[in-house]
Image (spheres, grey):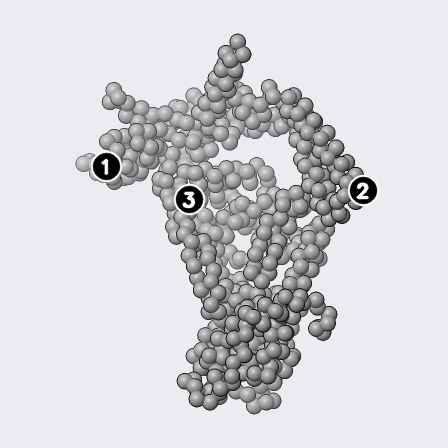
Amino acid sequence: MHISMLRVPRSFFLSLSINYRIIYMPISLYKGDTMFSESIFSTFYGRVSTDSDEQTSALENQEQYWLNYFEKNNLKLNPDCGAYYSREGNLEPRKGYYIDEGISGYKSKKYRKAFLRMIQDAKLGKFSKIYTRSISRFGRNVTDILNTIKELKKYNVGVYFEDINADTLNPNDEFKLLIFAGIAQEESRLKSASVQKGKMVAAKNGIWAGREPYGYDINNGKLVINEEEAKIVELIFDLYLQYGWGLSRIAKHLNSNNTPRKRSAKKWDHSLVGKILKNRIYIGEVWLHRTYIKDPQQNIIEIVPEFEQIKYIDENLRIIDDNKFNQVQQIKSERYSMFGDFKYKMVEEVDDLGNRKTKKVRIGIDRKNQRYSGAHIFSNLLRCNNCGGMLRFKKQKSTSGKIHSYYFCSNNDRLGSCEFRNLQREEELIEWIRQEIDEYRLDYSRHERNFAYFTELKFDLNEVKDKIISLQRNLEELKQDKEANFKLYSKELIDENEFANRDKKLKHEISQVEDEIYRLNNIDREIEIVRKKHDEFVQALKEIDLENLDNITLRKIIKEIKIFTHIDGKLYRYIEWKYLDESEEFLLDEHINKLLEQFNLTNSDS
């Protein structure tokens, strides 16, 4: 691209001339008597910024071009170095040259692995000259480019840029390099802005930007279900929901069956399984344009305001039904609350180019109790109500040789911090829980009471009419604000940009209020949906096979079984039952709180 086609601010070059004046050094620093002997070898560097087939072909052309160039000009490659960093994340050896496939020129440390290997090898004296097609191939971040050039000069290694016929070891080329480094950066900034705009427009038209999620392919720019991968997605959800497997166990199962991943030979891990389980694309919910690159130079990414994000439902993309997906999220939330959170610390790193960066690193798990397990029928269901700890499982052989299974307070057993052992025999617990479930599932008045408390909590029917009136007033005010905004613009009191921003925000707020009014006016329909879930819950209780209970079945209907020793010295058990997404105990507490609020309000009125 010709220089005149780009608008590069004067201040940009002024700052460069101040900040990077150090690059104007006498050639004697790099020639003649130095501690580094000049290598007889040279190398070349190639890169493309995306992993499209067209770019990959261009990369192959780059590679072949330089091999022919070296042969023609009698330049020697060092067979003891070289690297090819593939789009799949594999660093492979090459005989004397370096290639980064599908990697942005901005990214130096984390992504451009072949580039960094080349810099390390340069410092080891494995070659004395790097050939590359252009500055934009070498990098698009001016700071990185000039710092790298300066660093290489210390080791008497030069870089030759073919397109501008410039050599970093030639002092006459230094100003040319400075100018073209600035142009490469500005060109990339404009390109990044254009790409961001294009992605947003494409997203609004249903075009998928970026790589396809597991379970899908891209056909004519749009997502389509990959039937074979969709089966694996369904399996992952079933193993987690129906069998109670953890993320690591699912990953191990997939690896043991040689289940292929999307685009590489890497193995499955708990992180990827976890991402699949929470990705709403599997219920057909498309959510795009959530972030944008504010500053590509510093890789600053910002969140797009929610009302500007693109959301829509496409039933053609559905793999998992809503009920199954929501149950999985509920279980994930329960495990998260029960078994603790990840621990992090902030660490500062310095890359090979001297750039400092602070990042958050996971250093372990801050467990509240113990790890999740579904190995035994009562795993992670029994809690010592005297100290709050969980009961652990243990097998023990009696004097007669029979093996018995027990549960007892882990804090009493391991730490001695609880004075109560609260020992439970598994066979006795199973008989007791069978009786409790049998009584509970036939207590229809109890289920109806729970339904009433649940709808009271979720819908607050007594306040619906007042809420609708309040929202309608709010809606009228927003419409007036929208009209006022137009009048300000028509009288030229605000410019077009300010008008557009205000108008977009007001439209979003109006839409939200209208949606809420519609929801409240149709709240009976939502209650019908809850009633249907209630009926399904009661029916599922009836169908429980009491002779074949397992941990998964119990988790669906029981939040916890509390074991405690009373002041009278007797041992008691208490079940905290689940009802839909809440615990029965919580629903009762909330109902009592509401009654107390109403009572206090009545007393204050009187």
Q: Mark 3 points at which residue?
A: 341
Mark 2 Cα shell of 10 Å, populated few (<14), some (14-19), many (≥20): few
The mark lying in front, picked from 1 and 3, is 3
The mark lying in front, picked from 3 and 2, is 2
Q: Mark 2 points at which residue?
A: 491
Residues at circles 2 and 1 in contact by the CB criterion of under 8 Å: no
Q: Earlier in the sequence, mark 3 or mark 2?
A: 3
Q: Residue furthest right?
A: 490
Number of the label disc, if any, that sits on residue 416: 1
Left or right side of 58 for 447: left
Q: Where residue 72 sits: x, y (%)?
A: 60, 89
| Secondary structure found at label 3 | strand
Q: Where is the N terminus found, in terms of image quarters?
A: bottom right
Q: Residue at x 51, y 13 (%)?
A: 604
Q: Which amino acid does label 3 sit on?
A: Asp
Q: Which residue is drawn at 59% across and 89% down?
A: 73
| Secondary structure found at label 1 | loop
| Secondary structure found at label 2 | loop
The mark lying in front, picked from 2 and 1, is 2
Q: Which of 380 and 439 is in front in this view?
A: 380
Q: Which amino acid does label 2 sit on?
A: Lys
Q: Where residue 103 sits: x, y (%)?
A: 57, 66
Give the answer, above or below, for where 510 lies relative to 91: above
- Residue 67 in view, yes or no: no
Q: Which residue lies furthest to the left in this view?
A: 399
Q: Nearer the viewer, residue 314 or 425?
A: 314
Q: Which of marks 2 and 1 is nearer the N terminus?
A: 1
- Residue 298 in view, yes or no: yes
Left or right side of 62 for 40: left
Q: Earlier in the sequence, mark 1 or mark 3?
A: 3
